[in-house]
């Protein structure tokens, strides 16, 4: 199973962006979403932002991921 994690774009530098994924900062490629801007939410998979999503969708997805993680404990 593949999964994409929602992340908030914190900064953009050419084809790379710093994102905040549920409190963890990472550098990801933005080749697939070249129009992304600081403040956008993206889905991140395998080190790349693959889609820009709305904030509500990102929040709901984060909540589901946390619920799933808690169920596994």
Image: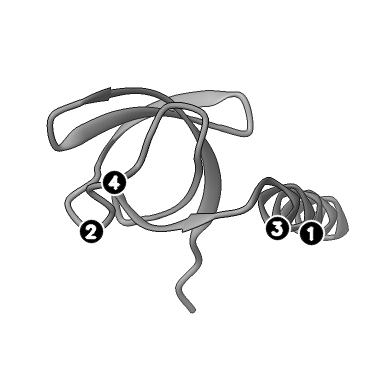
Front residue (pair 48, 54): 54
Camera-near label (1 vs 2) is 2
> Which disc, if any, is residue 35?
4
> Which disc, if any, is residue 3?
none
Q: How far apart are labels 3 and 4 at the CA level?
A: 19 Å
Q: Is residue 43 left or right of residue 66?
A: left
Q: Earlier in the sequence, mark 3 or mark 4?
A: 4
Front residue (pair 18, 54): 54
Disc 2 is placed on an element classified as loop
Which residue in the structure is indicated by mark 2? 32
State the image quarter where residue 37 is shown.
top left
> Which disc, if any, is residue 57?
3
Q: How far apart are labels 1 and 3 at the CA level?
A: 11 Å
Which residue in the structure is indicated by mark 1? 64
* Residue that appears at 62% across and 53% down: 54
Q: Is residue 48 above or below residue 2?
A: above
Could you say where residue 24 lies in the image, as x and y percent from the top left?
A: 52, 25
């Amino acid at each position: 199973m593949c999964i994409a994690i929602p992340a908030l774009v914190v900064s953009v530098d050419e084809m790379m962006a710093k994102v905040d994924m549920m409190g963890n900062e990472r550098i990801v490629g933005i080749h697939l979403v070249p129009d992304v801007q600081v403040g956008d939410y993206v889905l991140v998979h395998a080190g790349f932002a693959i889609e820009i999503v709305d904030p509500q969708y990102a929040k709901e997805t984060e909540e589901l991921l946390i619920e799933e993680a808690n169920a596994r404990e």
